[in-house]
Amino acid sequence: MKKADANLMKEINLNMVRQMMKRVETATKPQLASLTKLSVVTINSLVKELRELGEIFEDETAPSSGGRPALTYRYNYDFSLALVIYMKENLGQELVSATVVNLENQILHQEEHLMSVFDRERFYKIIGHFLTLYPAIKVIGVGIPGQAVNGEVTVSGHRELTGFRLVEEIESQFGLPIMVENDINAALSGYCAKQELEDEQCILGMYFPVGYPPGMGIYLDGKIVKGKNGMAGEIKFLPFDLDWRRKMDKEKFLGAVCQIIQTVNAVLAPDKVVIYQDRVEADGWASMWEAYQIRQPMPSYPEVIFQGTFQQDFEAGMRWLTLKELEPALIL
């Protein structure tokens, strides 16, 4: 039992030094001891282990006012890499985007492949191509336009993805852990990661892609609320008589958005609702929403933000979520 406790304490201390080095990038052993409040003896042992792993390396010698100059260590942000891959639409074309990022969230390589119809074998070839180029990839993040339950895509705007046992097949094929997230949850994660949010804030993100049904993400108390089988936010199943795949005029679309906000506001009372859409210009929203509130009073009113950065937030969220999978997990 004492050995197990000692091993756990060592892992806690190792992770503390690892996280500090990732944050400051370069440090001497005395600086690390001061920053982590660990003894110099403990720091010596942990730095030696991280050097042997290749996670840190010796850098320049720090100047000294007297005595022996201190050796500086630099964190190796390329020690572990993440592959982020997802489907996207650009100018009516379906693409697969693949990005390699390091532990500093720096993009090392990015490619886009035209794939009008989802092709499983070609999808695997793209993954294999990147794993050959970057053997340090240790996790794969997959963004999907839909929802996966127990590793199987059960709901998707792309019919070809439905029934795809995503996690199981990719893990079996490549032997790496897989992080799967749907598009709106990832975009909302990316949006919230950039904001200075107060504790206990509730933020909703709604995505209205042209030609596809909408989806919603729920961010509460610092995390995404998934619900049973990850199905929280499937607002396309709300009982509105709408065909989201058909073109709508501006008034009908904004009226539907008002109804959806009223419905979820009655249940969740969010602080903000972030709307991602390219169907209409946002200039007419304020007057319509104001008139709707007069007709349909509510106990509280969220701040509604029309955001034109879905792709940027989605990509940022996927990188952030995938890199989180590389954070060491302690087994207590």
Image (tube, rainbow, N blue to C red):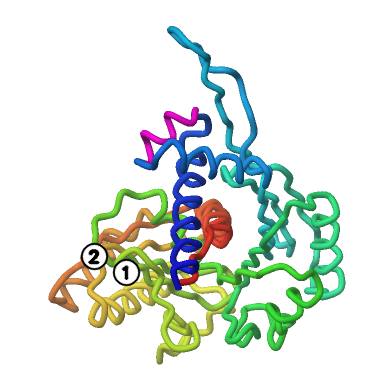
Q: Is residue 165 above or below residue 118?
A: below
What residue type is disc 1 on? Leu
Viewer-closest of 265 and 296? 265
| Total labels drawn | 2
Q: Which residue is mark 1?
A: 220
Q: Quadrant of the C terminus?
A: bottom left
Q: Secondary structure at mark 1?
A: strand
Viewer-closest of 150 and 65? 65
Viewer-closest of 118 and 297? 118
Residue 72 image-quadrant placement: top right
Residue 172 image-quadrant placement: bottom right
Residue visible at 80% across and 66% down in the picture: 115
How far apart are the alpha carbons under marks 1 and 2? 6 Å
Contact between marks 1 and 2 (CB within 8 A): the answer is: yes
Residue 254 falls within the magenta-colored stretch = no
Camera sees residue 311: no
> What range is drawn magenta here?
28-36
Residue visible at 66% across and 55% down in the picture: 82
- What is the x, y in percent for residue 77? 62, 41
What residue type is disc 2 on? Glu
